[in-house]
């Protein structure tokens, strides 16, 4: 849950990028960090293995300015995507306010995306959170690979697989080149902030 | 994880407790965070500034990981966590289900003193939050 400091008029919001391993969660944060480096006062923290896989989480905090008189600080996290890391994945979800589900558009990742979403639902359940009601944005990543001739799932297929029941905002993106990375971020921030407004105002 | 929004009065009282009981005893930094890694209060002695936001995120993750390990060995929790450095040390202590107190101090203070002060501080914080 968001932390609201009514004395210093500060809100801290936790947004988690979730999805199968190698889908591009870390790449999203890296792009955001690069893009907004001048406005981000702290370093991005990455707890990773020697071969550059996320071990625990990536962490990137930044301020989005004042909203209704409150200084809003957004804290972005990624989870480790590898199947064996579910225990740590679950820990990162503690106190989550909004989620970006980063799915991998490569054809051979189809089942992994579906499995990861199912596990997300279970992990949220363990905190009494509900995938159907938590602020959520879908991102179908790696669409730049189309030009390279890599077989990709169509956005319709991905919508069908992952978003036919949830019906949340979805973006085809490229975390590598930056396509729709910021649009995804803006959408999840606005959904998350409006969901905590009742507490705030 | 859900706890009521703290009032201004409660936040002021917490700041004061941290200052009185820990900073005045010689602690260099102290932070009260929640289990999601949000910072509720931070105090320092004016000489050591750290990136508290990153620190809070790492501390919450670290504590959660240790707690999950405790469950695996059949403990309900390891309520105390302590990292000793060359000159500085960090002490973590659970305040309640929702909060964690992190105390950073130098060689001149013993762990015994810190534990005493921290226990005292936790009682005070709990009575501010839950009364
Ligand atoms: N072509 C392409 N590669 C990507 C994209 N996003 C991530 N990658 C690559 O996919 C690999 C895994 O990305 P990473 O962000 O570490 O995935 P994570 O496990 O979800 O954090 C890396 O080699 C990235 O460079 C993308 O949009 N397009
Ligand atoms: Mg990663």
Image (spheres, rainbow, N blue to C red):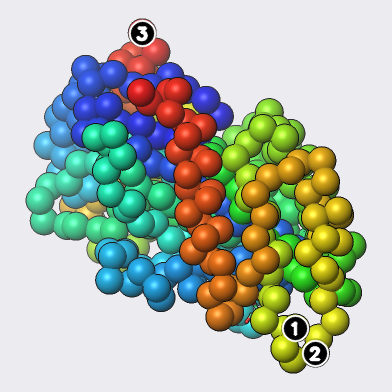
Residue bearing the label numbered 1: A146
Residue B28: % across, % down: 19, 49
* Total numbered labels: 3
Residue B113: % across, % down: 26, 38
Q: Would the CB of label 2 be found within 8 Å of ligand 1?
A: no
Residue bearing the label numbered 2: A149
> What chain does badge 2 belong to?
A
Residue at the image position 83 percent from the left and 46 percent from the top: A164
Observer able to see residue B43: yes
> Left or right: where does residue A169 sit relative to residue B88?
right
Indicate whether A137 appears above or below A174. above
Residue A194: % across, % down: 47, 34
Q: Crowding at label 2, few (<14), some or many (≥20) Cα neighbours within 10 Å? A: few
- In which quarter of the view is residue B76 placed? top right
> What chain does badge 3 belong to?
B
Residue at the image position 55 percent from the left and 29 percent from the top: B1
Observer able to see residue B62: no
Residue bearing the label numbered 3: B131
**CA gap, disc 1 and disc 3:** 60 Å
> Left or right: where does residue A188 sit relative to residue A68?
right
Instruction: Verify CB contact (< 8 Å) between mark 1 and mark 2.
Output: yes
> What chain does badge 1 belong to?
A
Residue at the image position 80 percent from the left and 90 percent from the top: A149
Identify the element where label 2 is drawn.
Answer: loop
Q: Which mark is residue A62?
A: none
Instruction: Verify CB contact (< 8 Å) between mark 1 and mark 3.
Output: no
* Relative depth, front residue between B92 and A8: A8
In the current view of this chain or complex, which residue is farthest to the front?
A156
**CA gap, disc 3 and disc 2:** 64 Å
> Left or right: where does residue A64 sit relative to residue A19?
left
Instruction: Verify CB contact (< 8 Å) between mark 3 and mark 2.
Output: no
Identify the element where label 3 is drawn.
Answer: loop
């Amino acid at each position: 849950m968001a932390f609201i400091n009514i004395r210093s008029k500060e809100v801290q919001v936790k947004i988690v990028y979730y999805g199968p391993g190698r889908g591009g969660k870390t790449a999203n944060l890296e792009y955001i960090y690069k893009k907004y480096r001048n406005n981000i006062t702290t370093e991005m923290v990455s707890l990773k293995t020697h071969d550059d896989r996320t071990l625990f989480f990536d962490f990137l905090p930044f301020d989005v300015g004042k909203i209704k008189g409150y200084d809003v600080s957004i804290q972005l996290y990624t989870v480790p995507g590898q199947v064996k890391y579910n225990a740590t994945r679950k820990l990162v979800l503690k106190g989550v306010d909004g989620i970006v589900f980063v799915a991998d558009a490569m054809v051979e990742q189809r089942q992994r995306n579906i499995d990861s979403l199912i596990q997300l639902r279970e992990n949220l359940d363990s905190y009494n959170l509900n995938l159907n009601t938590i602020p959520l944005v879908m991102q179908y990543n790696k669409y730049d690979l189309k030009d390279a001739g890599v077989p990709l799932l169509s956005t319709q297929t991905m919508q069908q697989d992952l978003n036919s029941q949830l019906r949340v905002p979805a973006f085809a993106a490229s975390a590598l080149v930056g396509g729709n990375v910021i649009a995804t971020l803006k959408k999840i921030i606005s959904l998350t902030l409006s969901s905590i407004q009742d507490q705030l105002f | 994880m859900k706890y009521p929004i703290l009032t201004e009065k409660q936040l002021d009282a917490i700041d004061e407790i941290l200052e009185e009981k820990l900073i005045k005893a010689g602690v260099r930094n102290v932070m009260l965070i929640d289990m999601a890694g949000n910072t509720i209060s931070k105090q320092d002695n004016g000489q050591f500034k750290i990136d508290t936001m990153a620190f809070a995120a790492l501390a919450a993750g670290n504590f959660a990981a240790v707690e999950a390990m405790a469950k695996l060995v059949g403990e309900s929790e390891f309520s105390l966590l302590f990292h000793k450095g060359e000159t500085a040390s960090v002490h973590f202590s659970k305040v309640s289900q929702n909060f964690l107190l992190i105390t950073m101090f130098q060689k001149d203070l013993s762990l015994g003193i810190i534990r005493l002060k921290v226990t005292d501080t936790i009682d005070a914080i709990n009575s501010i939050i839950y009364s």
